Image: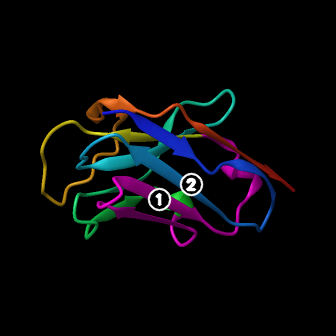
Amino acid sequence: VQLQASGGGLVQAGDSLRLSCAASGRTYIMGWFRQAPGKEREFVSGINRSGASTSYVDSVKGRFTISRDNAKDTVYLQINNLKSEDTAVYYCAADRRIDYGTSIYSSAESYDYWGQGTQVTVSS
């Protein structure tokens, strides 16, 4: 499976963005991670196959919303009220295992396929 992330850009604090991750095939557990300069990659959000189960890191709860359209093999990350600390490269990731469960993995090691990343820069 190949993943193509898009939707990043240079925005002002308080703006919104929608990131997209298009997959070349069927996916199950999907996640978004981000990596800021000089920092480790961190889990941001994840979603299961049906979309009924989602997970967020505490710092983005209430501002980020993950969703998916399985007909388009695409996962989205809606980001509202952007803050300077959201500046990072955002990566989407997919777990290769067939999993219809509700558990969402927050460890990068649980994901097998990664997109190339899309830069989000928030100016204050």
Q: Give the labeled residue for mark 2.
A: 19
Is 71 inside the magenta-drawn segment? Answer: yes
Please report the residue visible at 62 percent of the width from the left and 51 percent of the height from the top: 7
Q: Quadrant of residue 70?
A: bottom left
The residue where tag 1 is placed is 76
Q: Secondary structure at mark 2?
A: strand
* Lateral position of residue 70 relative to residue 14, left or right: left
Q: Is residue 12 left or right of residue 68?
A: right
The amino acid type, in three-letter code, at marker 1 is: Tyr
Neighbour tally class for label 1: few under 14, some 14-19, many 20 plus, Cα within 10 Å = many
Which residue is the extreme one toward the top?
38
Is residue 16 placed above or below 122 in the rendered structure? below
Residue at horizontal 36 percent and vertical 57 percent from the top: 72
Q: Say above or below: 90 vs 62.
A: above
User: Which is more toward the observer, 57 or 80?
Assistant: 80
The image position of residue 26, as x and y in percent, is: 24, 46
Left or right of residue 30, residue 21 in this image:
right
